[in-house]
Image: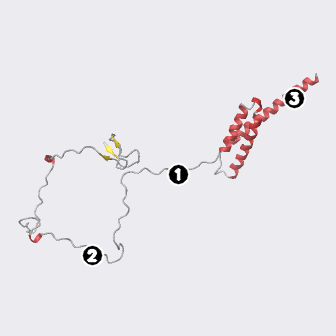
């Protein structure tokens, strides 16, 4: 079992190394294993140093070899590295997730999409009650305005294909409407001659 030191959540999965909540390195919380004293290996005593020196009898700190406290180091005299060592900020242990990439905004193409939607509505449902006459004008107007914006500032504006589709579908509607009006006018004219 592993535990997060920050949020104290416990995890049963042994393969997890980091907290799923905050990304902190997990700590093992498995029960302590009993120490096997038989498995402890004792190192042999070091050989005596050469030069005829022998260890004095008694305790290690007795006699002429009694340990003395060390003198503090002398202060620096100048030059590179003068002054007391100041440790830097403590590094936080464990893996930290990288920061998210910066949000890059794409080119503006909302007016072009609106032009395309109006144009498609005009050509498909615009025949009902002549609604297309009201939606074709915005399709053409928005499409032309977006094409002008794309021409003036292509880095910030996009959607040229959408604008062209909106203009084309609205123009097709007006052409078909004009064609039907001409046919209707011609048929009325022909009936008037009879």
Between 20 and 169, the one nearer to me in the picture: 20
State the image quarter where residue 193 is shown.
top right
Q: CA distance from mark 2 to mark 1?
A: 52 Å
State the image quarter where residue 90 is shown.
bottom left
Question: Mark 1 vs mark 3: which is more N-terminal?
Answer: 1
**Residue that badge 3 annotates:** 185
Q: Is residue 94 left or right of residue 40?
A: right
**Residue that badge 2 annotates:** 74
The location of residue 133, given as percent across then percent down, is 77, 35
Q: Which mark is residue 22?
A: none
The location of residue 153, given as percent across then percent down, is 67, 52
How many C-alpha atoms fall within 10 Å of the one at disc 1: few (<14), some, or many (≥20)?
few
Q: Is residue 83 left or right of residue 73?
A: right
Question: Mark 2 vs mark 1: which is more N-terminal?
Answer: 2
Q: Residue furthest front?
A: 8
**Residue that badge 1 annotates:** 102
Judging from the image, what secondary structure is the residue with disc 2 in?
A: loop
Q: Is residue 70 above or below residue 20?
A: below
The location of residue 73, given as percent across then percent down, is 26, 73
User: In the rendered image, is residue 159 in sight?
Assistant: no
How many C-alpha atoms fall within 10 Å of the one at disc 2: few (<14), some, or many (≥20)?
few
How many numbered marks, from 0 up? 3
The location of residue 119, given as percent across then percent down, is 71, 37
Q: Is residue 171 left or right of residue 1?
A: right
């Amino acid at each position: 079992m592993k535990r997060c030191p920050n949020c104290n959540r416990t995890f049963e999965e042994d393969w997890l190394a980091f907290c799923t909540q905050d990304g902190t390195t997990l700590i093992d919380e498995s029960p302590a294993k009993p120490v096997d004293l038989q498995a402890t290996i004792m190192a042999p005593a070091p050989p005596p140093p050469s030069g005829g020196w022998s260890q004095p009898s008694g305790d290690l700190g007795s006699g002429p070899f009694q340990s003395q406290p060390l003198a503090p180091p002398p202060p620096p005299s100048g030059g590179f590295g003068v002054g007391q060592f100041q440790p830097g900020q403590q590094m936080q242990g464990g893996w930290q997730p990288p920061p998210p990439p910066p949000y890059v905004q794409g080119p503006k193409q909302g007016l072009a999409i609106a032009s395309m939607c109006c144009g498609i509505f005009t050509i498909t449902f615009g025949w009902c009650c002549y609604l297309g006459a009201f939606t074709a004008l915005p399709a053409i107007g928005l499409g032309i305005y977006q094409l002008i914006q794309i021409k003036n500032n292509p880095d910030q504006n996009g959607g040229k294909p959408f604008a062209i589709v909106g203009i084309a579908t609205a123009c097709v509607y007006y052409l078909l409407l004009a064609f039907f009006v001409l046919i209707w006018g011609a048929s009325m004219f022909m009936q008037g001659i009879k």
